[in-house]
Amino acid sequence: MTRIHENHPERSASSKMSESLQSQQNPLPQPPQPARYDRLKTIDPASLKALLDQQAVTLVDVREPIEYAGEHIVDAMLLPLSQFDPAQIPDAEDKPVVLYCRTGSRSSQAAQKCFAAGATEVTHLAGGLLSWKADGYPVQINRKAPISLMRQVQITAG
C-alpha cells in the first residue's frame, strides 16, 4: 500500500497553529468518575434499631405493596421501587433517611435514583429485612395479607 503525501503550501503557519490549538481544546477522555454506588452508605440492623428507638431516622421500605402488607419494620413508610420518586421522601434535615428492601438489592437501586436526583448521601440497611429479622428485631406482621407471587410459586413448586 502506497501512501500519498501532499504538500499544501497554501497552509500558513497560523492555520497549523489553529489546528494545534483545536486539538488541545479536545483533551483526552477523563477517567470515569466513581460510580454512584461507591457513595452508598450501609447501616447494620443494630445501629438502625438504635436510631429507630430514638426516632432519629426516616425509614423507607422500597419493596412492593403486597410485600409491605405482609410484613415490614414498624414505622417504615412505603415507597415501592417500581414507582420510586425520591421527591416523595419527607425532607427532614435533622433525620437521615435509610432505605431497605428484602435483601439490599432494591434499596441499592432506589439509592441510585436518589443520587440521580441530586442526593449526596444515601444509606440503606445492609442485608435488608432478612438481616433485620435474622438479628431478632421485630417486624409488624399482617397474617391476613395475601402472600406474594414468589412465595406462591415456592409453595407450589414444593
Image (cartoon, rainbow, N blue to C red):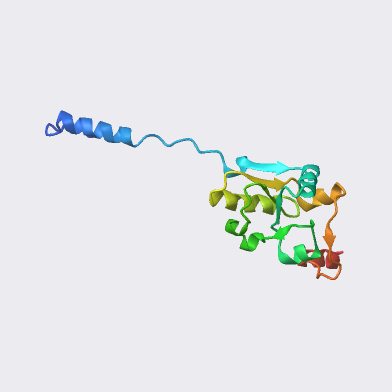
- Residue name at image x 72 percent, y 66 percent: 65
Q: Residue furthest top?
A: 13
Q: Nearer the viewer, residue 43 or 95?
A: 95
Q: How far across and down, in percent of the image, does residue 134 sit?
A: 85, 48
Q: Which quarter of the figure is the C terminus placed in?
A: bottom right
Q: Quadrant of residue 89?
A: bottom right
Q: How far across and down, in percent of the image, does residue 66 sit?
A: 75, 67
Q: Which quarter of the figure is the N terminus placed in?
A: top left
Q: Nearer the viewer, residue 27 or 56?
A: 56
- Residue name at image x 68 percent, y 54 percent: 106
Q: How far across and down, in percent of the image, does residue 108 sit?
A: 66, 49
| Residue 120 visible from this viewpoint | yes
Q: Nearer the viewer, residue 82 or 19?
A: 82
- Residue name at image x 71 percent, y 59 percent: 77
User: Does residue 4 appear to the left or right of 125 in the view shown?
Assistant: left
Q: How far across and down, in percent of the image, does residue 76 sit?
A: 74, 57
Q: Residue furthest left?
A: 10
User: Does residue 36 appear to the left or right of 140 in the view shown?
Assistant: left
- Report the number of discs: 0
Whether 142 is drawn above or below 52: the answer is below
| Residue 2 visible from this viewpoint | no
Whether 115 is drawn above or below 153: the answer is above
- Residue name at image x 64 percent, y 62 percent: 82
Q: Nearer the viewer, residue 144 or 32?
A: 144
